[in-house]
Amino acid sequence: MMLKVEDLHASYGRLPILNGIRLDVEVGEIVGIFGHNGMGKTTLLRALIGELPARQGRILYRAKDISKDPPHQRARAGLGYVPQGRSIFPGLSVRDNLRMGCAGRVRDERRHIDLVVAEFPRLAPLLDQMGGTLSGGEQQILALARCLCGNPQLLLLDEPTEGIQPSIVDEIIEILHRLHGGRGLSVLIVEQNREFLAALSRRVLFLQKGKIVRQLAPSSLLNAERIDEFTS
């Protein structure tokens, strides 16, 4: 088991957001988290990576309890996180953004970046360009590549298609399929784009009011009437 979450509770101040989350991700599995705005999707990822403390419950990563570990320890253990909005460094070049992803984690930085860029060929001609001048889709690809520089085993993605043109969404689907097959990555994706989740996920968990309320077959996401039943 790559990840197991048991009765996870988290809050912002006195406002409870996560109310007993239970989920698991197998080694090499892609799992989607679907839910509307305000249901706790981003909060869940922030709690998993350690940006938000758990009030109750346990987070087990490769059978080790990491519930109290700080974010940098979770990252070094193999959790990679691409936040909503991408959070690249706009004033740094693409190459230097990738170097930030390598910092303190690899020995031969130059060779490692070359290997990562080979997996993201769109970035090759952009290495000397400032991150802030890239399109939204290119920034998302850069954020994925930067995260991969840290050699994660479990990738946490928060709304990776937000504000991105359809052609780049299709490219990100291809990239994630390739990384999943080539690296054997486990992936947990928070997303509202139903087609994106259906194209990638082995199974989809429906999050409502801070709880996982049901598990869906990816194909069911394409049935708008059924989704309306879940949310009514």
Image (cartoon, helix red, strand yellow):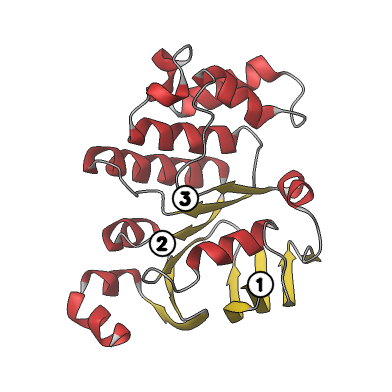
Give the secondary structure at mark 3.
loop
Q: CA distance from mark 1 to mark 2?
A: 33 Å
Marks 1 & 2, CB-CB < 8 Å contact:
no
Q: CA distance from mark 1 to mark 3?
A: 21 Å
Can residue 11 be seen in the rendering of this structure?
Answer: yes
Report the amino acid beneath label 1. Gly
Mark 2, residues whose alpha carbon is within 10 Å: few (<14), some, or many (≥20)?
many
N-term-proximal mark, 1 vs 2: 1
Report the amino acid beneath label 3. Gln
When asked about the image quadrant of residue 146, the answer is top right
Q: Residue 192 location, x and y as percent?
A: 34, 62
Which residue shows up at 18% across the image and 81% down it? 225
Question: Is 16 drawn above or below residue 196 in the view shown?
Answer: below
Report the residue marked by disc 3. Answer: 84
Q: Residue 48 location, x and y as percent?
A: 65, 62
Question: Is 52 drawn above or below residue 38 in the view shown?
Answer: above
N-term-proximal mark, 2 vs 3: 3
Q: Residue 82 location, x and y as percent?
A: 53, 46
Report the residue marked by disc 1. Answer: 13
When asked about the image quadrant of residue 2, the answer is bottom right
Q: CA distance from mark 2 to mark 3?
A: 19 Å
N-term-proximal mark, 1 vs 3: 1
Report the residue marked by disc 2. Answer: 201
